Amino acid sequence: MTRNARLTAVLLTLVTAAGCATVRLEKRLDPDSRTFLSEVRYIITAKERRTFRNLPAAERPAFMAAFWAQRDPDPATEENEFKTQYYQRIEEANFLYNEGRGSEPGWLQDRGRIHILLGPPDTRAQYPRGMTFYGVPAEIWLYGWFPIYFYDYNWNGNYRLEPDSAIQLAAIMKTQLMLKPQIAGQPGALDFRIDLKADAPDRRTLRVLVPYRKIWFKDEDGRLSTVLSVHVTALDGKEKPVWETSIEKPLAFKAEELIKLGRAELEIEIALSLPDEKGLLEVTLTSSGDGSKVTKRTPYRGFPPAS
């Protein structure tokens, strides 16, 4: 058992032990209150849950109304879009993930939980006979470039979230704390490194190195695609632009191809023509997948002055 798996097992044990007393308390609630707590289990905070349990029965309907009102993205409209979407995803999960024999309803399974919290994946790669000859049934969901792995270890249709997916679990918990059942390209998720090389006395090459896992892809006709744009500006000592260039890099992959890239980096090379002896390079990377934009600066030394 790996370290992450052991840690997950310990956490689950502690949560289960702490939850026994909670279950006893909640069994004393009226049916409507128990239903409410069950249905909002993925988005209610621990503090809200405690408050609700301790309220007199007559005050709980007002709490329920306030709970949803606080999550209404547009109070000016009659409909609470968040609440509507949340219950719609519960229905979708029950419909989509019901192949398990004698298992829990779809919305209570791992795939259902992720579907409710993050919405349907951009790409759902299914391997009902396993990814290898000796493998077990598996699914890989992609949200942009954010993979989540499920495995059916018992071959009974009840897929479990892979416990070693520590990054995925952390992101799921972050989404739960943000209290919204969706995930989008987070500002600042896009990132890159700069490598500036002097190939010759009169030639400089800029390499922009972008981790594939930091790029947000869109699902278009079964392929994950985006366009990366790099804009480079040379600034003099007074930060005045003295030279600039741009390049676009279209990307398109099948889900399986992108998964195999793992932690690899995309390399974008740009030949530079730097007029000053020294200054700053301002490099801006933009992704069409989610509109993310990141700008970084690095000092440079230009071509030596003519003798």
Image (tube, helix red, strand yellow):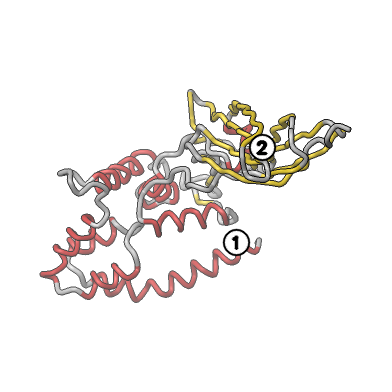
Q: Where 131 sits versus 57, above or below?
A: above
> Left of 106 or right of it: where is 133?
right
Query: From the viewer's perspective, is the residue at label 2 or at label 1 nearer?
Result: 2
Image location (x, y in percent) of residue 153: 56, 49
Kindly identify the residue that appears in the image at 38 percent across and 38 percent down.
96
Image location (x, y in percent) of residue 121: 45, 39
The residue indicated by pointer 1 is 5
Q: Quadrant of residue 243?
A: top right
The residue indicated by pointer 2 is 234
Image location (x, y in percent) of residue 100: 42, 45
Image location (x, y in percent) of residue 77: 17, 43
Q: Secondary structure at mark 2?
A: strand
In the image, 35 versus 145, the foreground residue is 145
> Left of 120 or right of it: where is 256?
right
Amino acid type at circle 2 is Ala
In the image, 252 versus 197, the foreground residue is 197
- Mark 2 vs 1, N-terminal side: 1
Q: Quadrant of residue 284?
A: top right
Amino acid type at circle 1 is Ala
In the image, 214 versus 40, the foreground residue is 214
Categorize mark 2 by other alpha carbons within 10 Å: few (<14), some (14-19), many (20+).
Answer: many
